[in-house]
Amino acid sequence: MHFPTSGVDVSPFFFPIITFVISFFTSMGGVSGAFLLLPFQVSVLGFSSPAVRPTNLVYNIVAIPSGVYRYIKEKRMAWQLVWVIIFGTLPGVFIGATVSIKYLPEPRMFKFFVGCVLLYIGIQLLYQTTGRHQKGREKSSRVLGMESKFNQMVKITKEKQKGLLKSGLAPEAVIKTVRFSMSKYEYEFWGEHYSFNSFFLFVIALIVGIVGGVYGIGGGSIIAPFCVAILGLPVYTVAGAVLLGTFITSIAGVSCYYTLAVTPDWTLGLLFGIGGFIGMYCGARAQKFIPERLIKLVLGLLITSLSIRYILQFFI
């Protein structure tokens, strides 16, 4: 099949399979997988024109709703966190999209920029799986409490199921808002309290929105690890909110690119999205069964390897 906008000639059945695999794993960390899909389009498919960025955002729009639905159903959606992310990233996306068209049209420079962004994300995720980081986390009784509960649930379930792992989080592991204001958001999850400065996250979301607009992603691949690594929030409570924020900002991003006369490859984006839609639902459902450290390790290895490749290509 030929895709005129991107110039790609590939079987349409190939794309949903790729995005299913990507989104299944990345959605567990609150990431749509667009940050991996864009390098795939540039390097493997040879789709490196500016239209690749809004096409990537079309994938987000089609794929994310299924994962969001699952997190809402399980009552693990931090709604106030969603609004902070949206109000910060929306104006940033418009700024970033404009910058990308005017100052980053050349594919070689674009790849280097992508590599730098991915390297930052990968290092953050991998550091969180190291012994040094784990020791630092042990100073926080709430983190120990949640990890202890998770491990205990696994142990009990394995005993009940005769060695078959079937459950990670307990049914009562839901998000309950305690307080929300312009300066502080506090919520409860599985008996533990978490809080952060709302305005600080708003500023970070604005910066991430700019980067996401340039890169052609919703920004979730940067905000999610930031919330977990810097704010100390559990990935089980961050994933749904970041995905929903990414969905809204992706709609804004496509609209912005369209007004700048950069039309996405709608058919290609839709085919990507079909696989992502199924993969995100499955990933969101499976997330509560997977240890947080393993989720970070898988994502960290994937992102870091891609980032090194793109940075090296700039100098070769």
Image: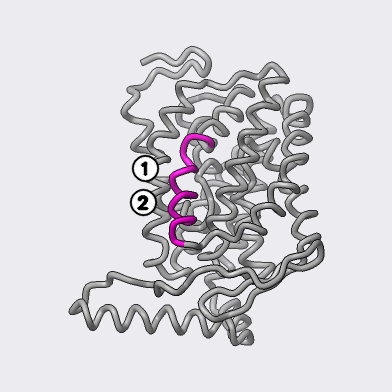
Instruction: Determine contact: label 1, label 2, CB under 8 Å.
Output: yes
- Numbered disc 1: secondary structure: helix
Residue type, mark 1 in image: Ile
Residue 134 in percent (x, y) is at 56, 79
Q: Which residues are magenta?
A: 61-74
**Residue 297 position (above or below residue 165):** above
Magenta stretch: includes residue 70: yes
Q: Residue at x 61, y 18 (%)?
A: 263
The residue tagged 2 is 282
Q: Is residue 178 left or right of residue 134?
A: right
Numbered marks: total: 2
Q: Residue at x 49, y 43 (%)?
A: 64
Q: Residues within 10 Å of mark 2 (few under 14, many from 20)?
A: many
- Numbered disc 2: secondary structure: helix
The residue tagged 1 is 278
Residue that extends furthest to the left in the rendered view of this protein: 162
Residue 315 visible? The answer is no
Q: Residue at x 49, y 49 (%)?
A: 68
- Quarter of the image with the N terminus is top left
